[in-house]
Structures are given as C-alpha cells and as structure tokens.
Amino acid sequence: MSRFLQLHLLTFYPPSNVNRDDTGNPKTAVVGGVTRLRISSQALKRAWRTSDIFAKALAGHMGQRTQRLGDEIFRYLREEKAVAEKAALEIARAIAGVYGKVKPEKDKNPAHTEQLVFVSPTERAAALALADRLAAGEKVDPAKEKDTLLCHADSAADIALFGRMLAADPVYNREAAVQVSHAITTHHVTVEDDYYTAIDDLKGAQEDAGAGFMGEAGFGSGVFYLYLCVNRDLLRTNLGDEAESGVMDEALAALAQAAATVAPSGKQNSFAALARAHYVLAEKGDAQPRTLAGAFAKPVTGTSLMENSIRDLKAFRADLAHVYGPGCDAECALELGHSSSATLAEIAAFCRT
C-alpha cells in the first residue's frame, strides 16, 4: 500500500462569502504580491465532517466534538436509570472531568467541560458504562479509569483523519492523518461590497419610502486551489483494529467526495455558492509529498481563469517531476469537459485502494 494519498483540486466559486473574517468580509491572503480570496482549512474540514457524505459512508464511525458529554451522561442517568438528580450530576461531573476540565458547580451548565472534546463512539459507550457502575454503587474513581474511557485508537474515522488534542492528557491525543491547506484563489481578487436594504412590509403608502434596514456584506469570486495530503500509515494506526474492517477505505473515499462537492456553509442562503470541483488530481505513492501551490505564485491572468489554472498546475507539476523525480506512483484525474476524464466515483475508488 502506498504511504501517501495526495489530492489537488481546482474549484470555481461564484460571488460568495463562504468563510468570513472578524469583520464579516471574505478571508484573504496576500500571495505573490496580490490579494487572493482564502477559505480556511478549519472551515473546509468542518463542512466535510458534518456533510451527508460522511454521515452516510461512516455511520457509526463518527466522533462528536462537544462540551456536553457530561450533560448526556446526566440525562442518561436521570431518564434511563432514574438516578436522583444530585447523584446523577455528581457522577456526570466526575466522568466528564476525565475528558476535560469541568465548569464550576455553580455554573449554569455544571456538567459541561470548559473546552470542546472530540469523543469517539467507543469512548462515549465507555463513559455510559462507567456511569452505570457508579450508579449501581460500585466504588470507582473515574480518574483512574482513563485507559478505559480514552482510546489511543478506535473506529472514529473523523478523529483518525483530522486528529484531536486533549491539553490535559496529551498521551491520548490523536495526530491528524490528513493535512489540509487553506484554499486560495489562483489569481488576484478584489473583495466587493454588496449594499442591500430590507423593506418593512407593513409600512403604509403615506409614509416615507425609506428602507427598514440597510447593510453591507463583502463577497468575492474566483478559482480556488486546494491541496490535501493523507498519511495512510498514520490513518491505519489511528484506526487500530478497525482499519481492516473497511472503515479506512470508506473514510478515504468520503474525504475525496466531500472535498470535491461540499462547500462551507457561510452566507449560502444569500449566495448559493454550492460549487463542484472542476479539476481533481489524486496521486498515490511513497515519495515525499509536495503541494502544487507554487504553480500560482505568479497570479493567473486572462479571461479563462480555470483553463489557465489547470494549464499552469500541469506545467508546474511537470517541472517538479523533471527536477525532483515523479511525485507519485499512480494517479487519477477528473477534468470537466474532457471525454477521457475520470468520474468522481472513479476518483473515490482510486482513493480506497
């Protein structure tokens, strides 16, 4: 099995604002001396992980990032086991404290952890099982049950792909098997402002003609380059025994499909920027991975930005191969408008094997 799987995607987004900065404008980056639009890797991974593609392909093998595990334990004890409220809260706080620092008892959410914690289905089941034992009167210190409650490897495909960090117990961290770049436009982009108004439907004709509300929203459009690198050896390690059950193959296929078809949700009701990748290159091999973002250090110009971006990416890849040798052992490419193009299903199948 090849150690690395690399994905390179070029996707056109129409006028939109799928990932905002602190001012509400689209995120940007200066690359090659010009401003580009940017979509953060965090926004992309969140969109993929919560997509229907992941939900269907990896049902039963998805973790949950939450502060509310203690709440779930509390409700379970109250509703399923009829444990008294005070005792249920005490148990919930004790178990939640293994996963992260618990909020003060006088807080309005005393069973919440201070930080979000990525919890796998295996760990959730272990937490509820320990709650059963404590509710039955067994004298157990949850702090001494960490190896039962926290896993080094399990079947949570999203944790295996994207990793997790437990600041209090780094020994239970999971290093991400997938590296995801920030997507940037291959060309210069100017962020524009959309001035809009809202009219009061109940305003009478005799009143002034002014709007009930006025506002501005930034937007931009362009061809985005995105790069992903998967360390398949690390993914196998993160999944442990479950790697051979088909979870790993389905996780890789779902990742490729989501990257090509799922956009972040920002301002989608206003812009409907539900884009699909125009070009996808999947590569497998043992050579040191490399991004092809250097193809766009000089911004692409012209009226055919997608075609020119594909041209420059292919040329840069060929130049790298000439100097450094092949960057992969096998490849599969999807390119809209070409009769020889692979389908997305074929890209997914290539990623599985």
Image (cartoon, grey):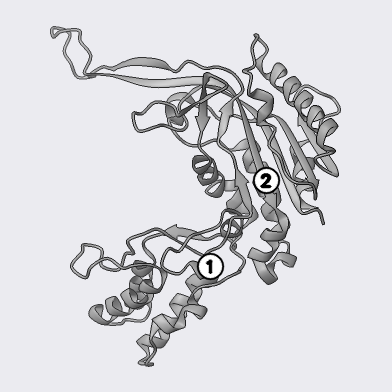
Q: Judge left or right: residue 97 versus residue 61.
A: left
The residue located at (25%, 63%) in the rendering is 109
Picture coordinates of residue 43, whole percent (x, y):
49, 40
- Provide the secondary structure element on which disc 1 rests: helix
Q: Amino acid at mark 2?
A: Cys
- The mark nearer the N terminus, 2 or 1, is 1
Q: Amino acid at mark 1?
A: Pro
Picture coordinates of residue 84, whole percent (x, y):
26, 82
Which quarter of the picture shows residue 346? top right
The residue located at (20%, 10%) in the rendering is 210
274 in relation to 165, above or below: above
- In which quadrant is the N terminus drawn? bottom right
Picture coordinates of residue 154, whole percent (x, y):
61, 69
The residue located at (63%, 55%) in the rendering is 177
- Mark 1 closeness class: few <14, some 14–19, many ≥20 residues within 10 Å: some
**CA separation, marks 2 and 1?**
26 Å
Residue 229: numbered disc: 2
Residue for badge 1: 121
Q: Judge left or right: residue 307 versus residue 161.
A: right
Residue 60: numbered disc: none
